[in-house]
Amino acid sequence: MKKYILFDLDGTLTDPKLGITTCVQYALQSFGIQEADLDKLEPFIGPPLKDSFMEFYGMEEEQALAAVEKYRERFRDKGMYENQIYPGVARMLQILSGRGFRLAVASSKPTVFVEKILEHFDIRRYFKVVVGSELDGSRSEKSLVVMEALRQLFGENPILYNEVYMIGDRRFDVEGARAMKVESVGVTYGYGSMEELVEAHADYIVETVAELQDFLLRELCELRSRGFMSVVGPMLFPFLLFLMIRQAASYGALWLAMNVESHVPEGLWHWLYYREAGTGELGYTGNLGSIMSALSFAAAGLALVPTALPVIREAKRRMALSHLRRERPVNYLLALLSGGCAVLGLNLLFDLTGITDSSAAYRAVAQSQFSASLGVGLVCYGLITPLAEELVFRGIVYNELKRGYRLPLAMLVSALLFGLYHMNPVQGGYGFLMGLLMAYLYEYFGSFLWPVLIHMLANSLAYLLSNTNLAGSRVHSWPVAIVCAALTILGLKLLDSHKRKLKGPVVE
């Protein structure tokens, strides 16, 4: 989590429109230029004044410097205080400072004016460092301001560029951040548009002060404001409901299957039922057992949809704050590679070590699940079951946990619950490890589709492996298991490095 935050001033912390535009108007009048519409002078908010006078009014550098002096003539006495702090900013700064963030201001406005404005709004105390330009016009480029702010903020310690955000409302803030290899957060409530910030390749964009606060605090534990039961309660009831409906639906499907048996056509009957030799007792095949299981999961999953969807949508809204940039296509391939290798590697590991043979409970489950035909098994266990389970474990349980605990703990607890839910040591261990992977990819891509996709991939691959003579093939070996483990770890490390390392923005 990044703990060093650089803020632009104008358009980010305060709304300076009246002061800046009237001072620009005053400076232009000294050159015989009359500009009655202050809205036309909004582009002066953000970039260095000299550059703006040259760009928008065609002034030579000497004229622009003279215009800046006329601007400051009014700004020192009046314009500086024709300013408003954005609602919620003071409270946000207080919270960030109290949570241990190290805050700084990095503005193109002269430092002496920045200091006075911060003191005027009583927010100077929240900042460790305040850096602006010099009155002689030097250090007006945003990259130089950011560089000096970082130098003062870190002192004699190495600058941790990956631990810093630069927050601003204009492209100059984004470009200055990128020049210093710092991630940028654009705010659209200031004077830069969404289009400007996207075109400048801001790493993240928020639309309100409240969203900015949520973004910066998104990885912090909020348990102080949420009691234990307020975290556990919202996930406990849906989880118990899922188990009860699944069990009830299972009994209902069994009752229905046994009562319609006599009406089933003979060709289909042998696909679904059998009679014990000697006793004539009616039984059902793996096909029917898998179908009944899938129906019970479908019923339980459908019952949870009204509860799960709002939680998933809220999680998506929060995650969107940190997933603005489009992912590199290679990241999708790495995620699929890691998931596939994890499935194959874990299956080989459990089989080669004899863990699968040591659990009678697992063998009973495997006999039931893997006795269905390949097509039935893939539909039931590769599609329906994963979707229903993901609604519970990542959709509700994990999302509720991470609202009260730090992400690593939420991942760990949700994966542990997912493992215990399987009620046998083999699937329990496998479920725990895959649960960690699915939660990680959920956070990485910010989409609920990813844990669903990986869960479906895992179950489908496992079912395909069960329908092949894995134990008698060349794949069934320690070297293959080790290679799969290595590829899984390598894929995840590459994903992590792509997320951490700044290689410039990714655009469509």
Image: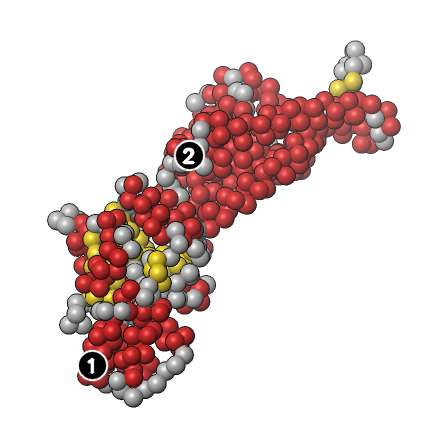
At 51% from the left edge and 40% from the top edge, which residue is drawn? 451
Tell me the crowding category of disc 1: few under 14, some 14 to 19, or many 20 or more residues within 10 angstroms, Cα based: some
Q: Position of residue 75 (x, y in %)?
A: 25, 71
* Residue located beneath label 1 in the image: 66
Q: Is residue 444 above or below residue 190?
A: above
Q: Is residue 113 above or below residue 217?
A: below
Report the amino acid beneath label 2.
Ser
Report the amino acid beneath label 1.
Ala
Nearer the observer, 427 or 352? 427
Q: Is residue 129 above or below residue 467?
A: below
Mark 1 vs mark 2: which is more N-terminal?
1
Nearer the observer, 415 or 404? 404
Residue 174 seen from this side = no
Q: Position of residue 427 (x, y in %)?
A: 52, 25
Image quarter (top left, top right, bottom left or bottom right) of the N terminus: top left
At 12% from the left edge and 49% from the top edge, which residue is drawn? 156
Q: Residue furthest bottom?
A: 32
Q: Residue furthest right?
A: 263
Residue 149 seen from this side = yes
Nearer the observer, 74 or 405? 74
* Residue located beneath label 2 in the image: 225
At 49% from the left edge and 20% from the top edge, which residue is drawn? 425
Q: Are marks 1 and 2 in contact (CB under 8 Å)?
A: no
At 33% from the left edge and 50% from the top edge, which residue is drawn? 90
